[in-house]
Image (cartoon, rainbow, N blue to C red):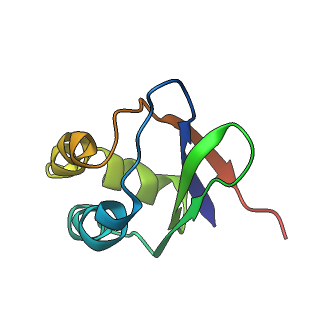
Amino acid sequence: MIRVSVLYPKGEGSTFNMDYYKTKHRQICVDVMPGLKKMDVEAGIDGPYEAVGHLYFDDMATVGAAMGGPRIVEAQNDLVNYTNIVPVIQISQQID
């Protein structure tokens, strides 16, 4: 299983609208990323991140197809609707 983590670092003046993310952005991601198995989000309490989103895929080929798909720009363009943070992306293979 491949996990794509989208980390939103805290910074002066940073904002993150969790309600919008959960009710609107999540559905956009589901709609535009074929092969997305699961998606979850964590709200930062203490530490360097406002929030961390996780997207799960079967393998790297599926990640490539989802991130390179024709509709991915819809998810990218939606970023301004819930945050002013430039996210950091980490792609990891889950190890049991």
Give the side of residue 20 with respect to residue 55, left or right. Answer: left
Q: Specify the farthest residue to the right.
A: 96
Q: Position of residue 76 (x, y in %)?
A: 25, 42
Q: In this view, does 25 lie to the left or right of 1?
A: left
Above/below status of 76 relative to 39: above
Q: Which residue lies furthest to the top in this view?
A: 12
**Figure label count:** 0
| Picture layout, residue 35 above or below residue 51 | below
Residue at 45% x, 33% y: name it. Answer: 14
Is residue 64 shown left or right of residue 78? right
Identify the residue shown where x is 44% and y is 27%.
13
Near-viewer residue (83 or 70): 83
Q: Which quadrant of the view contains residue 27?
A: bottom left
Q: Where is residue 40 in the image (x, y as percent from the top left)?
A: 52, 70
- Residue placed farthest to the front in the image? 13
Q: Can residue 66 be seen in this view?
A: yes
Which residue: 63% across, 67% down?
A: 1
Can residue 5 be seen by looking at this rendering?
no
Q: Where is residue 41 in the image (x, y as percent from the top left)?
A: 53, 64
Name the image quarter holding residue 31. bottom left
Whole-percent x, y for residue 85 in the image: 41, 32
Quarter that holds the C terminus:
bottom right
